[in-house]
Amino acid sequence: MTRLYGEDFFSSQYATIAIEPRVPQSAFPEHYHDFWEIVLVEKGSGIHVFNDQPYVLGSGTVCFIRADDHHLFENVDDLNLINILYRAPGKFRFLTDISRFLPSQDSPDNQVNWQINHAEMQLAKQYIHTLSELTADSSPEGIAASEGQFLQLLIMLRHGCFQNGGEDGSREQRLQELLRWLQHNFYNDIDWLVLAEQFSLPLRTLHRQLKQRTGMTPQRYLNRLRLLEARKRLLQSDKTITEIAHACGFSDSNHFSTQFRREFSHSPKMLRSGDPS
Ligand code: RM4
Ligand code: NI
């Protein structure tokens, strides 16, 4: 897996923060870094496979990535991202302890990956705009100013993360909750009508929104979640292919193999034998 190095992105060896807009972010293969990053989705859609777990990206999604996390972007459609890179939580020059504003190793996943609202997004863009000007200046004053601005941005983003539901139980939020729910329950039989009701969404809205965000029909997206989990288990466990297929929501392992091959261009068996060519 590729590792990305800070020296290719930071303006100098003294800079502790770098802004890397991706307009658009094209599909990008799996990688990890020697720096940390915050990914903010400005617009568009795509799938973010983060530590083997797929997340749907849409406008306002924020994701915190630690150096050793691995991730990739796929199924992107006009995905515009802003990456905010920083060396590491302990490697700022003037900020000494900001750990309470960063996710820790065992933070639940809604504190690593969440959604900010429109107003927060506007504010984030302003902060980032200033930040990107400041990061060009590697004098101590420039670095101090950029770290100050970074902290302000961080506090604001974190605030959105703990709001959780908050004042508007909007359609947008219910959709987010549904997507999150799906991420943890995809191996069950899913009845879309029941699910739509459970999250108080009209079935048509569910369909349309999921399609818009993922570029896939709900059923295809569900399938994809199942296949990604199966791929992970094939690589990481000793269970048989049939057992894994069942555990991931496929009742028929032949059907599973066909789908798997279609998605990843190699069969589960080939993956297992270490020859996914
Ligand atoms: C890439 C992609 C990666 C990020 C680098 C800096 O285009 O967004 O996730 O680590 O940029
Ligand atoms: Ni990255």
Image (spheres, rainbow, N blue to C red):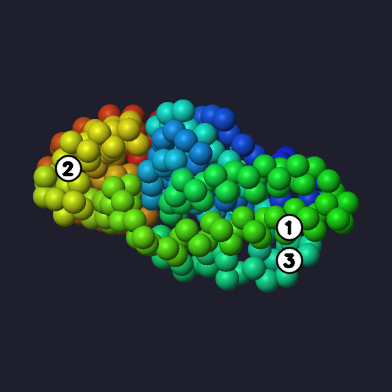
Whether tag 3 and tag 1 are in contact, CB under 8 A, the answer is yes
Residue highlighted by disc 3: 95
Distance of mark 3 from mark 2, alpha carbons?
A: 47 Å
Judging depth in this view, the residue of 12 and 127 nearest the camera is 127
Please tell me whether mark 1 or mark 2 is closer to you in this view: 2
Against 77, residue 159 (above or below) is below
Q: Residue at x 59, y 43 (%)?
A: 125
- Residue 270 seen anywhere in this rendered image of the structure: yes
Q: Earlier in the sequence, mark 3 or mark 1?
A: 3
Coordinates of residue 1 in the picture (x, y in percent): 54, 43
Q: Which disc, if any, is residue 147?
A: 1
Reading the image, the residue beneath label 2 is 202
Crowd around label 3: few <14 · some 14–19 · many ≥20 (10 Å): some
Q: Amino acid at mark 1?
A: Glu
Residue at left offset 57%, top offset 48%:
123
Q: Is residue 180 visible?
A: no
Picture quadrant where residue 90 is located: bottom right
